[in-house]
């Protein structure tokens, strides 16, 4: 393929991946209705991902053992953040959960500036202001204090914060290949979901109404497609595109999630929540917008 064709294919993969994750709430809630209530559905999905990635990652176990421990913890923490994001869909409204998660640019910039000591361009400061303003507007839509109103909203907010911490560690310390990284990621997610599950809902009884085969089939499908195929495709595509384009294309998740939740689950955002969500999206766009670094002559 030509360079333009590769770029077009990579762009399509990233956009489709974002849009597809906007539908991830469907299998999560379907498993909840099948009897895997609370976090147990996420346990099943991430457990299936671990089983699928295990044989491939096992061939590269030496690379895992040689990897920096901080990097491994960061990758596993990223998986835990995604597990929390997954569980949140059972306890909150889809669009709000996704928007709260997409506040990650705010937390990432603050961590980069005050923890890592990295330079913070003015455009990133504007992104922080927009993101926090969007958070306040969105959460105060019913006239109450701008705080999460359900367990799902708290999980969505915390998952974005954990993901920001994880990506900072991955960016600064990890050189692990995509396949073993995906396995560690899924393992962290499965462990986090398994720890949380008993505290949220009792262990599910035998599933008789829909059949164990249906539950296992859906769990394997979700683990293979969302935690397997889409991750591989995204990893292939992101190294072939500019980070700004990747970040903007992935925001298709917000649009697809909001529309699908409105059409299927009847979850419609009011005008105030839409305004807050628009500010959050604007913050995300500014965070990935290319920033021109000052030239050496200008700084001299």
Image: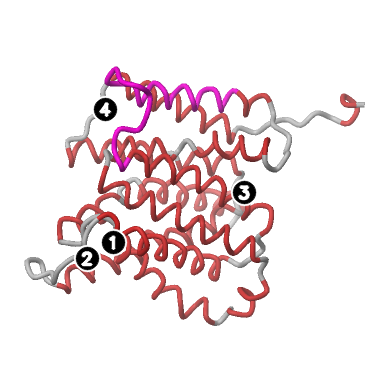
Q: In this rendering, would 274 be left or right of 201? A: right
Q: Callout 3: few (<14), some (14-19), or many (20+) C-alpha neighbours within 10 Å?
A: many
Q: Which element type, helix, strand or loop, lies under badge 2?
A: loop
Q: Which element type, helix, strand or loop, lies under badge 1?
A: helix
Vertical comparison of 47 with 283: above or below: below
Which callout, 3 or 4, points to the residue nearer the camera? Answer: 3
Disc nearer the start of the sequence (4/2): 2
Q: Tell whether label 1 touches label 4 (CB within 8 Å).
A: no
The residue to which callout 1 is attached is: 198
Disc nearer the start of the sequence (3/4): 3
Q: Callout 4: few (<14), some (14-19), or many (20+) C-alpha neighbours within 10 Å?
A: some
Q: Tell whether label 2 touches label 3 (CB within 8 Å).
A: no
The residue to which callout 4 is attached is: 269
Which residue is at 20% across, 68% downward? 215
The range drawn in magenta is 126-152
Q: Which element type, helix, strand or loop, lies under badge 4?
A: loop
Q: CA distance from mark 2 to mark 1?
A: 6 Å
Disc nearer the start of the sequence (3/2): 3
Residue 140 on the magenta span: yes
Mark linked to residue 203 = 2
Which callout, 3 or 2, points to the residue nearer the camera? Answer: 2
- The percent coordinates of residue 246 (x first, y second) are 53, 44
Disc nearer the start of the sequence (2/1): 1
Looking at this view, is 37 or 89 the one in front? 37
Which callout, 4 or 2, points to the residue nearer the camera? Answer: 2
Q: CA distance from mark 4 to mark 1?
A: 32 Å
Q: CA distance from mark 3 to mark 2?
A: 35 Å
- The percent coordinates of residue 104 (x first, y second) are 51, 39
Q: Quadrant of residue 216?
A: bottom left
Q: Which element type, helix, strand or loop, lies under badge 3?
A: helix
Q: In this rendering, would 62 be left or right of 235? A: right
Q: Callout 1: few (<14), some (14-19), or many (20+) C-alpha neighbours within 10 Å?
A: some
């Amino acid at each position: 393929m030509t360079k333009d064709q590769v770029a077009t294919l990579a762009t399509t993969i990233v956009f489709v991946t974002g849009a597809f994750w906007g539908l991830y709430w469907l299998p999560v809630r379907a498993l909840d209705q099948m009897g895997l209530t609370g976090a147990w559905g996420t346990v099943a999905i991430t457990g299936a991902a671990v089983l699928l990635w295990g044989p491939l990652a096992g061939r590269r176990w030496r690379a895992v053992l040689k990897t920096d421990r901080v990097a491994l913890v960061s990758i596993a923490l990223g998986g835990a953040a995604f597990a929390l994001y997954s569980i949140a869909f059972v306890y909150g409204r889809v669009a709000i959960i996704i928007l709260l998660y997409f506040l990650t640019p705010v937390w990432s910039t603050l961590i980069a500036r005050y923890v890592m000591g990295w330079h913070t361009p003015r455009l990133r400061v504007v992104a922080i202001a927009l993101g926090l303003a969007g958070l306040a507007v969105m959460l105060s839509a019913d006239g109450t204090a701008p705080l999460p109103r359900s367990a799902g909203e708290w999980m969505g907010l915390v998952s974005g914060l954990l993901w920001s911490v994880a990506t900072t560690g991955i960016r600064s310390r990890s050189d692990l290949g995509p396949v073993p990284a995906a396995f560690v990621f899924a393992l962290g997610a499965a462990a986090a979901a398994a720890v949380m599950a008993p505290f949220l809902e009792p262990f599910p009884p035998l599933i008789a109404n829909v059949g164990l085969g249906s539950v296992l089939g859906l769990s394997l499908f979700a683990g293979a497609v969302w935690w397997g195929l889409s991750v591989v495709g995204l990893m292939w595509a992101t190294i072939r595109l500019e980070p700004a384009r990747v970040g903007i294309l992935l925001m298709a998740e917000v649009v697809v999630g909001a529309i699908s939740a409105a059409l299927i689950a009847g979850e419609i955002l009011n005008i105030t929540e839409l305004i807050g969500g628009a500010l959050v999206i604007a913050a995300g766009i500014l965070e990935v917008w290319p920033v021109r670094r000052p030239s050496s002559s200008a700084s001299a």
